Image (tube, rainbow, N blue to C red):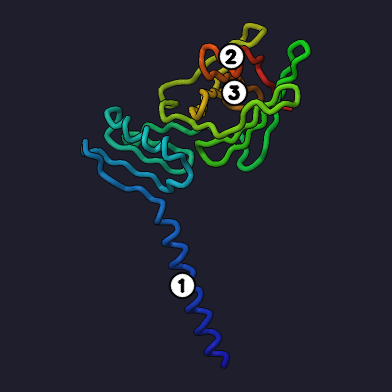
């Protein structure tokens, strides 16, 4: 009886190991692009499909690319790191006050490239959605001036559904965020002069 239990346990363990291996492998991308360049993503479920597709279109910039967790490696040695200042699956709240107007922004990082957001003015929900890091972040950072004329370095995320939402998060600390919402030139939904929001 004991031998039978041990044998069954080993079979279950082996099956679980095979399932784990298949789960790990099913999201891997390992291919040669039409240009002949190597393209590797360890786990595509950790990034937006848009980000991965943009990386493919950057193939004139590299001979090979590897994306392993937050490390983006071009030509085997040129490493960029995806910014991950925000914690995963945890809402971080920001606020700014200008006169009688209170601006609030909640951000939650979903994976290496996607963040959920909720933008509120005076307790009224203005817009919520998901913003995505563009692959072009590797070409340089964005700078925004504060009210004290200091420039802060930021990483941009975009939500292009319905209106164009741009969320810029301070690099290194995520203490400050620049938020911009533009629908069209005549829309009452345009919020292009939102003050810098500070982490609460």
Give the percent coordinates (x, y) of residue 63: 27, 34
Image position of 150 (left or right of 12)? right
- For the C terminus, which image quadrant? top right
Q: Callout 3 environment at 10 Å: few (<14), some (14 to 19), or many (20+)?
A: many
Residue located 70% across and 30% down the image: 93
Mark 1 or 3 closer to N-term? 1
Q: Earlier in the sequence, mark 3 or mark 2?
A: 3
Whole-number angstrom distance, CA of label 1 to CA of label 2? 55 Å
* 99 on left or right of 184: right
Look at 63% across and 43% down and name the residue there.
89
- Location of residue 172 (image quadrant): top right
The answer to whether 162 is drawn above or below residue 193 in the figure is below
Count of numbered badges drawn on the protein: 3
Pointers 1 and 2 in contact (C-beta within 8 Å): no
**Whole-percent x, y for residue 64 in the image:** 30, 37
Q: Nearer the viewer, residue 193 or 69?
A: 193
Would residue 107 be found to the left or right of residue 53 on screen? right
Quadrant in the picture for the N terminus: bottom right
Query: Which quadrant of the view contains residue 76?
Result: top left
- Contact (Cβ within 8 Å) of mark 3 with mark 2: no
Q: Please give the residue where the numbered disc 1 appears in the rendered image.
A: 15
List the residue tagged with mark 2: 192
Query: In the figure, is residue 170 to the left or right of 97?
Result: left
Indicate the secondary structure of the residue bearing disc 3.
strand
Across and down, in percent, residue 166 comes to: 54, 23
Q: Nearer the viewer, mark 1 or mark 2?
A: 2
* Crowding at mark 1 (Cα within 10 Å: few <14, some 14-19, many 20+): few
Q: Residue at x 36, y 36 (%)?
A: 53
Mark 1 or 2, nearer chain start:
1
Q: Which element is circle 2 on?
A: loop
């Amino acid at each position: 009886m004991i031998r039978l239990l041990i044998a069954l346990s080993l079979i279950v363990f082996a099956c679980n190991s095979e399932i784990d291996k298949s789960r790990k492998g099913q999201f891997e991308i390992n291919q040669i692009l039409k240009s002949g360049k190597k393209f590797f993503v360890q786990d595509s479920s950790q990034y937006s499909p848009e980000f991965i597709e943009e990386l493919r279109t950057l193939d004139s910039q590299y001979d090979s690319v590897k994306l392993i967790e937050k490390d983006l490696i071009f030509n085997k040695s040129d490493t960029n790191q995806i910014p991950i200042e925000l914690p995963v699956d945890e809402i971080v709240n920001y606020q700014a006050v200008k006169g009688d107007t209170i601006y609030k922004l909640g951000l939650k990082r979903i994976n290496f490239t996607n963040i959920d957001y909720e933008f509120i003015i005076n307790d009224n929900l203005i817009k919520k959605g998901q913003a995505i890091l563009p692959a072009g972040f590797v070409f340089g950072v964005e700078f925004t001036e504060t009210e004290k004329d200091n420039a802060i370095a930021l990483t941009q995320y975009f939500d292009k559904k319905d209106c164009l939402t741009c969320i810029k998060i301070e690099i290194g600390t995520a203490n400050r965020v620049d938020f911009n919402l533009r629908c069209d030139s005549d829309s009452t939904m345009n919020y292009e002069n939102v003050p810098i929001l500070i982490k609460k």
